[in-house]
Each structure stands twice: as C-alpha cells, then as structure tokens.
Amino acid sequence: MIARITTYMEHKLGVMAWAEALYTMAYDDLSAKLLGLRNKAESLAASSQFGDQAKPEMKLLLQDIHDIMVDISGVDTDWTQCLIAAPCEIWGDVTIFSKSKFFVATKAGTLESLAPTLDVGNCEMAMKPLFSVSRSSMDAKRLGILGIFPCK
C-alpha cells in the first residue's frame, strides 16, 4: 500500500487531476475539510506511533502527505474562489504562483520579476514601486504593467 500511494504522489498529473476534481465537485465546506486533512496529516507525521520503529518509507510517505496537504491548503487559501469558478485554472495561473514538488509546471504562463533590486551587504532586496498599474488586452492574452520605482 505504501508503494502504491508513493507512486501515485510521484505522478504529478494525477495529483493535479485530483486537485481539479476537488474543485469541480466542490461543496460549501471544502476549505474546512482541507484544513482538517492538513492538520490530521501533520499529527500523523509527528506521531510517536511512527517513531524510531517505523520504516523509512513510511516516514517519507507521511511527510509527503503532510507536505501535499500544506500545498493544497495554501492553494485553497489563495485561489479558492477562482478554482470553484473554473477548476481548470489549476493547470494555468495557480501553478505559476503556487510552487509545489507535487504540481506539474505548465507553460500556460510565466512569472518574471522586473523590479529593481537594492544591494544590501551580501544579498539583494527587491524594491517596492512608488506606483503601479496594470491593464490586460481585450482578449486577455496580454498584460501590461507599469511600475514607477525610486532611483537608487
């Protein structure tokens, strides 16, 4: 059973189809159910009954189940209204902004930050614009963004 569940979770297309099905057949308390599943996965992963005697594959599986529920709960928090209206968006915008080792990276869109950075010691910090506005084309295939940043 452990091998079958692990194999299923490694097939990202299956996980994405499962997520799409969740929202296709969504009901009123889906967010609460996902939160409950995440909490249950967290308690199982931390449970002493799966302590030192547990097989390494069982520990990895429980951690993966916990991780996938954290990722799905995060997607639900950020995208629930969009996904209930159009569950197929799990294949587009959602995976651009919500990264997970369980999700397929699609080429439906890309995300590239053009914001200038400020060198502070050994790291770079992104600067926030003073003003920003965006507009999309009538067919929603193009997006233009104007950001005004302070000079360095």
Image (cartoon, grey):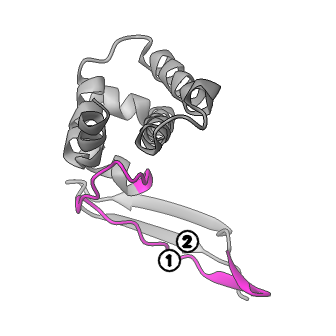
Look at the picture and state if 144 lies above or below 34: below
Observer-nearest residue: 107 or 9? 9
Task: Give the x, y percent position of residue 106.
Answer: 24, 58
Residue 105 in sight here: yes
Q: Which residues are magenta?
A: 97-125
Q: Residue at x 44, y 42 (%)?
A: 64
User: Mark 2 or mark 1: which is in front?
Assistant: 1
Task: Give the x, y percent position of residue 134.
Answer: 45, 60
Check disc 2 and give the amino acid type: Gly
Would you name the residue on which mark 2 appears?
147
Residue 89 in sight here: no
- Position of 50 with respect to 150 (left or right) is left
Characterize the magenta stretch by its predominant secondary structure.
loop
Check disc 1 and give the amino acid type: Leu
Task: Give the x, y percent position of residue 69.
Answer: 46, 34
- How crowded is the residue under tag 1: few (<14 C-alpha within 10 Å), some, or many (20+)? few
- Looking at the image, the residue that sits furthest to the front is 53
Question: CB under 8 Å between callouts 2 and 1?
Answer: yes
Q: Residue at x 51, y 16 (%)?
A: 32
- Position of 47 with respect to 9 (left or right) is right
